[in-house]
Amino acid sequence: MATTAPVESGAAGHGAEPRGKRGDDGQATYLIAVAEALWEEMERDERVYMLGEDIGVYGGAFKVTEGFLDRFGPNRVIDTPIAEETIVGMAVGSAMEGLRPIAEFQYADFMSSGFDSIATVLGRYHYRSGVPLPVVLRGPSGGYVRASSFHSVNPEPWFAYGGGIKIVAPAFPADAKGLMKSAVRDDNPVMYLEHKWIYRRIKEQVPTDPDFVVPIGSADVKREGSDVSIVTYGALVHKSLEAAENLSQRGISAEVVDLRTVHPIDEDTVLASIAKTSRALVVTESYRFVGIGAEVGATIAEKAFEHLDAPVRRLAPQNMPVPFSPTLEDAFLPQVADIERAVEELSAW
Amino acid sequence: MATTAPVESGAAGHGAEPRGKRGDDGQATYLIAVAEALWEEMERDERVYMLGEDIGVYGGAFKVTEGFLDRFGPNRVIDTPIAEETIVGMAVGSAMEGLRPIAEFQYADFMSSGFDSIATVLGRYHYRSGVPLPVVLRGPSGGYVRASSFHSVNPEPWFAYGGGIKIVAPAFPADAKGLMKSAVRDDNPVMYLEHKWIYRRIKEQVPTDPDFVVPIGSADVKREGSDVSIVTYGALVHKSLEAAENLSQRGISAEVVDLRTVHPIDEDTVLASIAKTSRALVVTESYRFVGIGAEVGATIAEKAFEHLDAPVRRLAPQNMPVPFSPTLEDAFLPQVADIERAVEELSAW
Amino acid sequence: MATEASAPPADSTGARRPLPDDELVEMLHMLKLCRYFDERMEALYRQGRLPGAIYSGRGQEGTHVGTAWALRPGDSLFPTHRDLSAQLVKGLDLKRVMAQFWGRIDGYTRGRDGNSHIGDWQGNKTFTVMSHLPIAYPVAVGAALAYKLRGTDDVALAICGDGATSNGRWHEAINTSAVHRLPVVWVVNNNQFAYSTPNALEFAVPTIAERAAAYGIPGVRIGGGDVLAVYEATRTAVERARAGEGPTLIESVSLRWRGHAGHDPAKYMPEEMLQQHMANDDPVRNFEEYLLTEGVITKDDLEALMHRVEAEFEEGYEFALASPFPEPGDATKGLWVEDGYWSSEPGRGGGTEAG
Amino acid sequence: MATEASAPPADSTGARRPLPDDELVEMLHMLKLCRYFDERMEALYRQGRLPGAIYSGRGQEGTHVGTAWALRPGDSLFPTHRDLSAQLVKGLDLKRVMAQFWGRIDGYTRGRDGNSHIGDWQGNKTFTVMSHLPIAYPVAVGAALAYKLRGTDDVALAICGDGATSNGRWHEAINTSAVHRLPVVWVVNNNQFAYSTPNALEFAVPTIAERAAAYGIPGVRIGGGDVLAVYEATRTAVERARAGEGPTLIESVSLRWRGHAGHDPAKYMPEEMLQQHMANDDPVRNFEEYLLTEGVITKDDLEALMHRVEAEFEEGYEFALASPFPEPGDATKGLWVEDGYWSSEPGRGGGTEAG
Ligand SMILES: Cc1ncc(C[n+]2csc(CCOP(=O)(O)OP(=O)(O)O)c2C)c(N)n1
Ligand SMILES: Cc1ncc(C[n+]2csc(CCOP(=O)(O)OP(=O)(O)O)c2C)c(N)n1
Ligand SMILES: [Mg+2]
Ligand SMILES: [Mg+2]
């Protein structure tokens, strides 16, 4: 894991630095993988276009769309006023006319400023009209970067509740690329959450096949284990993998299930893991109360009851703003040590 | 239970008819109980005032504030423009200056139009500043009245997730009165959800003591039982009681726990009931995915594991708009028969 | 500042009437149909024979018919709960509209929504109305953006009420459309009340049209009692938009003759105000008299027209009540495109008696 | 339409300077302090010695100092991320401000937020800044409403940027305040960019001030390079509000000299534009020269002033680094009033090394 130092100075990790390129070894950061997917989909389908704040000349707050304006021009890379409700409305209206918009939110935090157009219009229009809305809403979410209350939110439950919007939150570059392609090609609204802590930290080999996709709605077991299942997503996949590695030193075998899609949830994969381990720890950055972890916990309790040898534990932050100070943020968000402790308690049951 | 007929014609039950008065028998409808509490609190404390759309001359879409303008005048009963973000902002700003605002939303559905000011400002301001915000947001929520997608919402999870706002949803007139008084006297933000299906349907004896309060955060067992616990709130408390009565004819004893406050949840009362029955059915009008039922289900699974003899079942609508047509709404929302069936399955476990 | 609508160009025949006579007669037919529909539906509602809610547009038919008349089939309309008449002009089938009011499968939303929360995008390019005000305004920006990006000369027209102009979405949408010079016409149906709230409690300027200056676009104010004035002002704005000259704001002033919804007796409405408007600004009677004076129609034509209107309503009513309710099992279908609910015919086994 | 700010009334001494000399000197002190603070903090940020983010207000000190100067202690200020200088003028303690930047317990948010997301309601009547734009505008309406209902003559003043005017909240708040004639002053710090986005992509009118006409309130446009012009325009607006005459919209034009935040090199900013503004409209240098020419200060005074500023910064820096981090166990306290976190002194055992 990278230390937090370079992030602490660096304005919540957002980018003066250029996005960068794949290394000669073919490895790509998560940031690059997202940009590659967007670029290839823009190349593939003329109907795909982007809109958002500062995505053109500036290339986006995190440089995801750097270079897109030069390549695709101002008609397909549109800088908008600071009007999130209208950004979403524009996406919806143009999708009704057959375009396939990708709207960037400068931070996922500001999706709350477009809430009504997202939850009321985007999520509910197709059910009442039959008109498909192939809209992608994307933005950087999550904490661990000293960005405090308004630049660290995990908005997924807000937008899962109303329904009608698929929500993905990849943890690895390859998944990020494959899920973005699926999102752009999906005829339903998709919210695509990019974890800003992962952007420049995690790199791996990423497929170059232009049609490489990761299906929406499928979870993935990132580490096999037999004693306890850790069900998680986003930045916490990496912290869970680190915890699992440490636990293995102590003879505890933890399986790590990466949801990848948080709405709808891949129940089969989750339940199969529980059937194997009989113990479930649900680890989310999404708040505890009515968070994604609550849904996963309730689902396991309802559908894997006969397999459970221990209570379904949730590890998640309390429902309140993410604090700024390092001592507070570290105490507030789940850490590797917290995961290890929870797994040990569960396996002791 | 009243039939739905008078409601089907009657514009989603909203009110041309005057609010009405207590009967000579001292019985009050839920609608009257809410109005009584507001009236008494306005009388008790000069700092309390109301704002919202059409609450003055018109007396509110459901007539809750009928007569308030005449009694308290235009400085304490303020008609606002159709600007929910600003209605909430006004409440927050005036609360910062020591007033105790009560903001009415014409329907709880339109809380989504004030989402950012509610979730971002109202819910998060005290944690970062230490300034108390004694604000009450109230409005009619819920379905079963043929009011379709935009006049039937259960918004509670949207506003529970971000934290910092207590949320109450009473089912009986006495609870409605006592909880409203607690809400107005609370120094924290409180969202008060009035179920429009209950407004004029349910009446009972309601205390007249001006200081009768029902504490926020306390659930109440509305019917004792030994075989299965039904944990619910709002209109479904009444449907659950009807189901419990029917089940008792068939020798099944169901306990009905009325949460009354949906955030935070009274875990002690819920867990005590599960400890007694060992079987839990969570029935909510709040959607299934990341709804209040998910939280209750996950909490029971986590904290009452050793008591459970059966999986924690959830009965809740899918996450999508509430449809208009009688055949669709009846199939979509949980009905008495659905509750009976679910309880029977659980007790057969 | 608001400018008066410029007089229309003389048409090919050199006559000063802006439309050929047969179109004028058809315009009267729509005005009559909308008025009759509105009255009959209210009567049925009062008798408890109509479920759900009704939002009367009576007194505002001039605004609805006049604006929608200026649109081509390929243009899109983004209305509110109050604007059913505009949707009928745009092409909605009265039979399917009435099926929607009774929650039947042949309604445009297949029973999923009721009353004027209706639309027919696939057939007539009208947005399926949502309650939240004015939430269709930002969506209209998107449709207009698509026309610009595609290089077509289609136009989007959005309507909302006077009260909705106080909402932030109204500002965002108009501002954004002005920045990008999009082909959209912004109509405000100023019926002088937002539910019980008069204009003076919604905004502090004398007219809504003058607010156009804050967006650098033209603002026009017209009386909704004159359907041709509304039509001409709208046509001018639509032509501007087609020519790539950007948005226009049109304020059409009328009065809401009935309550906000069927249940509302509107006691807050000054009786004299109402009487005056009904006496002088009735868009239906005004237009009828105009056509009679101009000799475009005769009293006999008028009678025939009314028979036609009544027949259309009866046909719609029978169609609606004969249409089955949706099948209960379909309640949760059609949320996601891939389940195919909307691309196939729905089941018709729901029966015609309320479940 | 926008009107120029009216000239200030001559003060008691009959001199044309709007403020007593000692106040003018103190005004220069604040201008210098804000400029120096801004420069030093950026340097520390670049060296990686400052955590989190910084949002430079350099070049806009005239707007911040001039507006805040017109307020009384009992008046309230609703600023954004860019307006720390205005908060300093309103009375925030530099030491506690710097403690906030370093996430320490003595910061105004007790380490819960960083940088200019700060405020001190209890002490100086400033709203604790939230990022969402311009979300403090509606809150300012509420404070102003309270002043009106209470019958006090206090005033609320809210600031936001040019870009934030495109957001619906901006419209709602100003419109509502105009309808109820509330004692509030709406300031727009037009630094000509919203992050990388120029005015032309945010709105389609030449000035923001002229939009006041859409709300029936006065609109004033002034150059932020002249702190006294800003002060006088604001004082006029504040007096209007105190007198119960309602809101005023003030547009103060400047330029953002640095990037949007510390990480932004602002390559999109035309070099010449920047050079010109720095040469002609530097509010700090302009005011310094004015006071020198007017003989209000001497070169020696100036030198002393700079020493004072440097000393204040050093004191603040040492205070900040000596202040402990919050105790981890307090992370979840203070969400609800009843846990008493905010009504008691917080623990100081968090140490001074980042955990
Ligand atoms: C955002 C929002 N808030 C509240 C409502 C409830 N509501 C429905 S219609 C209405 C009045 C609308 O007035 P106006 O915009 O003038 O339209 P009209 O009904 O007069 O045509 C209100 C407040 C709503 N639909 N949307
Ligand atoms: C609702 C919302 N959307 C997006 C952002 C991200 N953001 C932060 S500052 C900024 C630019 C603001 O420009 P302006 O209003 O002119 O203020 P300035 O920073 O220039 O002082 C943006 C887009 C935000 N804070 N709030
Ligand atoms: Mg109106
Ligand atoms: Mg700016």
Image (cartoon, coloured by chain):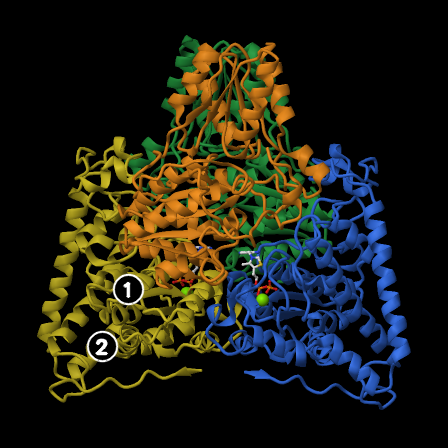
Chain colours: A green, B orange, C blue, D yellow
Q: Quadrant of the C terminus of chain D?
A: top left
Q: Are marks 2 and 1 on the same chain?
A: yes
Q: Residue at x 56, y 19 (%)?
A: A302
Q: Secondary structure at mark 2?
A: helix
Q: Give the x, y percent position of residue B329.
A: 67, 38
Q: Give the x, y percent position of residue C291.
A: 82, 82
Res C61 → quadrant: bottom right
Q: Is residue C34 above or below residue A347?
A: below
- In the picture provided, is D26 more to the left or to the right than D217? left
Res D64 → quadrant: bottom left
Name the residue carrying label 2.
D287
- The kind of residue tagged 2 is Phe
Name the residue carrying label 1.
D147
In this view, which residue lies farthest toward the front?
B24
Q: Is residue C125 above or below residue D253?
A: above
Q: Is residue D255 above or below residue C105?
A: below
Res B85 → quadrant: bottom left
Mark 2 or 1, nearer chain start: 1
Marks 2 and 1, how far apart in space?
34 Å
Q: Nearer the viewer, residue C72 or C51?
A: C51
Q: Nearer the viewer, residue D279 or C87?
A: C87
Mark 1: few/some/many CA within 10 Å (<14, 14-19, 20+)? many
Q: Nearer the viewer, residue A293 or A151?
A: A293
